[in-house]
């Protein structure tokens, strides 16, 4: 029973109208213990569709950071129910909570159907390190490129705006194809594959492996070259663990926001390395050991050293030169107090449009001058979307502003 745990973690629920980032204010949220149905927390969403952080019991930290420390599940499970006028009531089971961190549970409410049954139930699967182990067969680190006939062979790796995730085995024709924004996909996989309680350098190493694995599938057109109409699958028998709607942990999300254009490669190859990995405890492979990476990080190893141990001393990190889905190019300049110009005006205009949906973001003059009002608007945006609240616009913030702007403006 969860409440017997002595450690604590925080849970925030983000309620939106369907899959779009359109917040639902004044939605009611209940958190209950799945063991006995006991009501533990009740909250109402603010203008940004978010609840306050709710502190809840979580297992001891050592259960999730030391391999083999415990055979008990290292995270708590909660049920979340969300209700809002004009929408279907959503019951989410299997919401995960780890100690000393923030878990963010997205609740995408479908519109109510007049006279219909307006209750939807979602059960999230177990975490990849706790549920059934992955059984990916070994693959070559460097893949043959697709034939040019009928397919586009990219001259260099590109960060796509979306990946098409086949939610099942490749040959399961009944499985859905989900269009998922690239960065959201990486966050989902990372939160499905590792624990947010791990050392930051271990999280970085694993995120880089996940990024490279994904971009190799994109660059080599792995599945499209076999006649399929998707980029990657959610089956760990073939690819990576993806669980639509799963709990996202802020600590992992911050790392992804910082690294999402970076991948692992080697001299003499154009493609991202196919970075195989496994848990290193129940399954072994020729690539990164997830638990092993955490043990090395505990010893003080940095992310690159961890990756070199598993993939070879000759690997290095490279950043993609092209990122799809950003309306205007980013000039690698950090915009901050005193900055001026068209890039500042673009950010101001996009924040004003986003503020129509998220009124907690104050309206600002689109005058191209980065003053205190612009800084305040940027800081509020960063707070809502779980970015470091610096008040300045670096690439991660620029990209997220562009992504949200495209979504709320209906440009996607």
Image: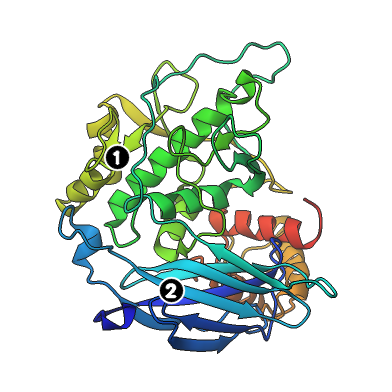
| Label 2 vs 1, first from the N-terminus | 2
Residue that carries the numbered disc 1 in the rendered image: 304
Q: Residue at x 65, y 60 (%)?
A: 401
Q: Nearer the viewer, residue 63 or 331?
A: 63
Q: Residue 7: x percent and y percent?
A: 26, 78
Choose top left, top right, bottom left or bottom right for residue 224: top right
Residue 145's spot in the image, x, y percent?
Answer: 55, 15
| Residue highlighted by disc 2 | 78
Tell me: residue 33, above or below residue 214.
below
The quadrant holding residue 345 is bottom right
Asked if 311 appears above or below 7 in the picture, the reply is above
Left or right: 188, with 20 as reference point = left
Q: Nearer the viewer, residue 356 or 247?
A: 247
Mark 2 vs mark 1, foreground winner is 2
Nearest the eye: 153 or 378: 153
Which image quadrant: the N terminus? bottom left
Local crowd size for mark 1, using a 10 Å CA cut-off: few (<14), some (14–19), many (≥20): some
Secondary-structure class at tag 2: strand
**Whole-number angstrom distance, CA of label 2 to CA of label 1:** 36 Å
Residue 365 visible in image: no
């Amino acid at each position: 029973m969860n409440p017997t745990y002595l450690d604590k973690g925080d849970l925030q629920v983000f309620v939106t109208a369907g899959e779009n980032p359109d917040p639902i204010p004044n939605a009611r949220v209940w958190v209950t213990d799945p063991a006995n149905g006991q009501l533990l927390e009740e909250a109402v969403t603010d203008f940004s569709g978010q609840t306050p952080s709710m502190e809840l019991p979580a297992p001891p930290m050592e259960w999730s950071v030391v391999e083999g420390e415990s055979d008990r599940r290292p995270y708590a499970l909660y049920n979340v129910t969300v209700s809002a006028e004009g929408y279907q009531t959503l019951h989410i089971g299997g919401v995960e909570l780890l100690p000393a961190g923030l878990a963010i549970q997205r609740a995408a409410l479908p519109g109510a159907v007049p006279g219909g049954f307006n209750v939807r139930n979602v059960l999230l699967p177990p975490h990849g390190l706790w549920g059934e182990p992955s059984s990916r067969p070994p693959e070559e680190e460097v893949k043959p490129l697709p034939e040019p006939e009928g397919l586009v062979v990219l001259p260099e790796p590109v960060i796509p705006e979306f990946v098409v995730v086949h939610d099942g085995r490749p040959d399961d024709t009944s499985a859905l194809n989900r269009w998922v924004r690239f960065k959201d996909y990486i966050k989902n996989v990372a939160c499905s594959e590792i624990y947010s309680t791990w050392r930051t350098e271990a999280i970085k190493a694993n995120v880089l492996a996940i990024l490279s694995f994904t971009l190799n599938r994109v660059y080599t057109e792995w599945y499209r070259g076999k006649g399929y109409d998707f980029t990657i699958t959610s089956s760990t028998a073939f690819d990576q663990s993806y669980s639509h709607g799963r709990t996202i942990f802020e600590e992992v999300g911050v790392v992804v926001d910082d690294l999402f254009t970076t991948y692992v490669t080697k001299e003499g190859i154009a493609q991202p390395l196919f970075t195989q990995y496994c848990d290193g405890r129940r399954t072994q492979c020729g690539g990164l050991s997830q638990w092993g990476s955490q043990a090395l990080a505990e010893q003080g190893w940095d992310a690159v050293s961890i990756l070199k141990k598993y993939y070879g001393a000759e690997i290095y990190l490279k950043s993609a030169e092209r990122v799809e889905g950003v309306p205007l190019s980013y000039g690698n300049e950090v915009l901050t107090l005193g900055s001026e110009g068209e890039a500042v005006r673009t950010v101001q205009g996009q924040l004003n449009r986003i503020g129509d949906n998220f009124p907690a973001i104050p309206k600002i003059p689109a005058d191209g001058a980065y003053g205190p009002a612009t800084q305040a608007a940027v800081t509020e945006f960063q707070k809502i979307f779980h970015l470091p609240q610096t008040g300045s616009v670096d690439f991660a913030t620029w990209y997220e502003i562009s992504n949200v702007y495209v979504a709320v403006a209906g440009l996607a």
